[in-house]
Amino acid sequence: MTTSGKPGFFRRWRRHLLIAGIGLPLLLLLPIAVAELWTYALSSGRCHNSPEQCQAESVGLVLGCSKYIRRGHRNYFYLKRIEAAAALWRSGKVRCLIVSGDNRALNYNEPRDMRNSLIAEGVPADRIVCDYAGICTYDSVVRANRIFGAEKLIIVSQESHAERAVTIARHLDIEAEGLNAPLFAITRSARLRAYLRERAARVSMVYDLLTNRTPHHMGQKETLPY
C-alpha cells in the first residue's frame, strides 16, 4: 500500500485553508467597507457641531434612545440629545421638532420622554410632534418625510448616528443635515461596544436602502404645526 499521494493531499488542504483564512475575513469586511464609504459619500460635511452651522427653515428630527441605561442611572446619550435639540430650537433654525422613537412596550415610551424633557428645556409643547413608530433610524427618517411631510431635516443625535441618518435621508432624496450631540465621556469598553453597534447598524442600513424597505408602521399622514 503506497502513501505517495498523501503529501499532495495535505498541500491541497493547506492551500484551501489558507484561501478560506484570507477570503472569509475579506468577505465579512466587504459589507462594512461598502457601508462606511456610502456613509462618508453622503454625509461628509453635513453634520455640524453647533446649530449656527445649520440651515434655517428646517424641521428638527430628534432620534430616540432610552432615558436610562438601567434603573436609576441616566443615559447621557439621551441627555445630550435633548440639550442639542433644545439649543437647535432656541437658534430659530427649525419650525418644529419631531421626536421619534420606540413605543412598543407599555412602560417604555421614548417620544413621550423626549417631549417632556424638551418642554422642561423651554421648547413650546405645540411645536413638538411625537412619532411613536420610529422603531429604528431608517423608519424615523422615512416617516418624517412620508407621514409628516418634512422635506428639509436637521437630524439630532451623536455624530456617527447622525451621519447614518443623514445618509439614509439623502439617499431617499430628502434634504438633510445633522446636528451632533456631544459624546459624553464613557468608558473604553462602552465606546468599543457603541462603535461595533454602529458598524452593524450601517450594514443594516445598506440592506434597507438597497431593498427600499417599507417601515414597520406607516399609517395616515399627519400635519406638522407650522
Image (cartoon, rainbow, N blue to C red):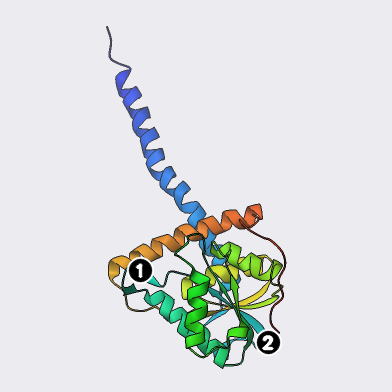
Q: Is residue 31 visible?
A: yes
Inspect the image, locate mark 1, and give the three-letter code of the amino acid beneath it.
Ile
The numbered disc on residue 57 is 2
Relative image position of residue 87 (x, y in whole percent): 51, 89
In the picture, residue 152 is in which quadrant? bottom right
* Tag 1 residue: 69
On screen, 45 above or below 199?
below
Q: Nearer the viewer, residue 164 or 83?
A: 83
**C-alpha gap between disc 2 and disc 1:** 34 Å
Point 59% across, 67% down: residue: 140
Q: Earlier in the sequence, mark 2 or mark 1?
A: 2
Residue 219 appears left or right of 35: right
| Residue at (64, 77) in percent of width and height | 153
Q: Quadrant of the N terminus?
A: top left
Q: Which mark is residue 58?
A: none
Q: Amino acid at mark 2?
A: Glu
Q: Identify the element where label 1 is drawn.
A: strand
Residue 173 visible in the shown view: no
Look at the picture and state if 86 lies above or below 22: below
Q: Residues within 10 Å of mark 2 (few under 14, many from 20)?
A: some
Q: Residue 45, position in %: x, y?
A: 56, 79
Side of 200 relative to 62 (left or right):
left
Q: For residue 224, which quarter of the picture?
A: bottom right
Q: Residues within 10 Å of mark 1 (few under 14, many from 20)?
A: few
Disc 2 or disc 1, which is closer to the eye? 1
Does 225 sit above or below residue 19?
A: below
- Give the total of numbered labels: 2
Q: Residue furthest top?
A: 1
Residue 191 screen position, x and y as percent: 34, 68
